[in-house]
Amino acid sequence: MTSRVRIIFIAIMVVLLLTGCVKEEAVKPVEKIRQVSVETIHKEAYKETISYTGFVSARQILPMSFQQNGIVGEVKVAEGQNVKAGDVLMTLKNSTDPSATIYASIDGVISEVINRAGDVIGAGYPVLILRSSEQIVQVGVTDVDLVRIEKFGNPVISINLDEKIFEAKLEDINKIPDESSRTYTVTVALDNKSDYLIGKLGKVSFELARINGIWLPINHVQNDGEDYVYIVNSENRVERRNLILKQINNDMVRVEGLEDGNRVITIGNSIVKEGQQVTAREASNE
């Protein structure tokens, strides 16, 4: 082979090699950077609470009646009226007998006037309802939660009525279950300024303790046979962290396997894989 032919051959080989390298580089896939939302987690004291629906009642509800038959003479009060102990509430017509007059036995509120002037009434039948001014809320709890409330001793209690939050105090626990619901009645006292309709429904929350740890919304946890979440590391790449679920409280779960300051993927966790590069945006900033 002459020198000229040899040079041409070498040149052709070099061109072919370079062309192959260019083609190989051209087909190399480009990594797609996805955008995800993250929440930076921190250790915190999460409230352990149990909540139930309760109803407003009065500390005392007193049906008032005459001790003799007769016809109602005067009705001195109206529903919703505040009265003092000793006030005259109702009288019988054409009678001078002391039992022909009903007096308020306590300070309170007229809850209901059952009979009007001219009605014929019988002895012992309620003609009006007097309730005490102090109001309570009663709730039926399960046997398990009853034990938890008793064990804690002095829970912090709040009541939500008409979107207003009131503090309340534990007043009584009835350890005899209701025959129909098999729940136990817990009574909590509202402050003296409360004035709600008897039977008004509200949410009663018992705060039993504050537990330190890392808490996540339970819907952020994924499972493929193991519980896990994806986090975004300092290089903006996805890492998988397997979790141990320690305690569930309402929609939150206390976990082991994460560290304070980890950025947990909350949106986009179903379309990423470990090691993938992402752009992370704090969920609170969206």
Image (cartoon, rainbow, N blue to C red):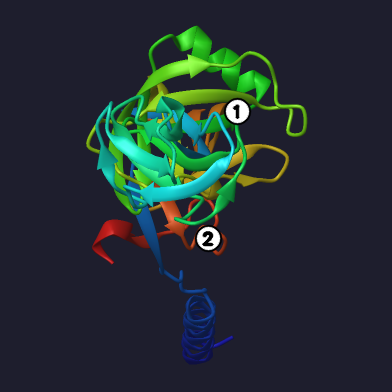
Q: Position of residue 86 (x, y in %)?
A: 28, 27
* Quadrant (top left/top right/bottom left/bottom right) for the N terminus: bottom right
Can the viewer see residue 149 in this picture? Answer: yes
In-front residue for pair 11/280: 280
Crowding around mark 2 (Cα neighbors within 10 Å: few <14, some 14 to 19, many 20+) is some
Can the viewer see residue 215 in this picture? Answer: no
In-front residue for pair 44/147: 147
- Identify the disc placed on residue 272: 2
Residue at 37% from the left image edge and 49% from the top image edge: 74
Q: Amino acid at mark 1?
A: Val
Q: Is residue 261 left or right of residue 129?
A: left
Q: Position of residue 198 (x, y in %)?
A: 45, 44
Residue at 27% from the left image edge and 33% from the top image edge: 87
Q: Position of residue 216 (x, y in %)?
A: 45, 40
Q: CA distance from mark 2 to mark 1?
A: 44 Å
Q: Is residue 171 above or below residue 23?
A: above
Q: Is residue 197 left or right of residue 122?
A: left
Residue at 30% from the left image edge and 44% from the top image edge: 195
Q: Is residue 240 above or below residue 24?
A: above
Which SS class for mark 2?
A: loop
* Quadrant (top left/top right/bottom left/bottom right) for the C terminus: bottom left
Which SS class for mark 1?
A: strand
Q: Check whether the beta carbons of the residues at disc 2 and disc 1 lie within 8 A of each other.
A: no
Q: Give the residue at mark 1.
A: 141
- Identify the disc placed on residue 284: none
Q: Is residue 197 left or right of residue 87?
A: right
Q: Is residue 253 left or right of residue 143?
A: left
Residue extending furthest toward the right: 180
Residue at 44% from the left image edge and 38% from the top image edge: 95
Crowding around mark 1 (Cα neighbors within 10 Å: few <14, some 14 to 19, many 20+) is many
Q: Amino acid at mark 2?
A: Val
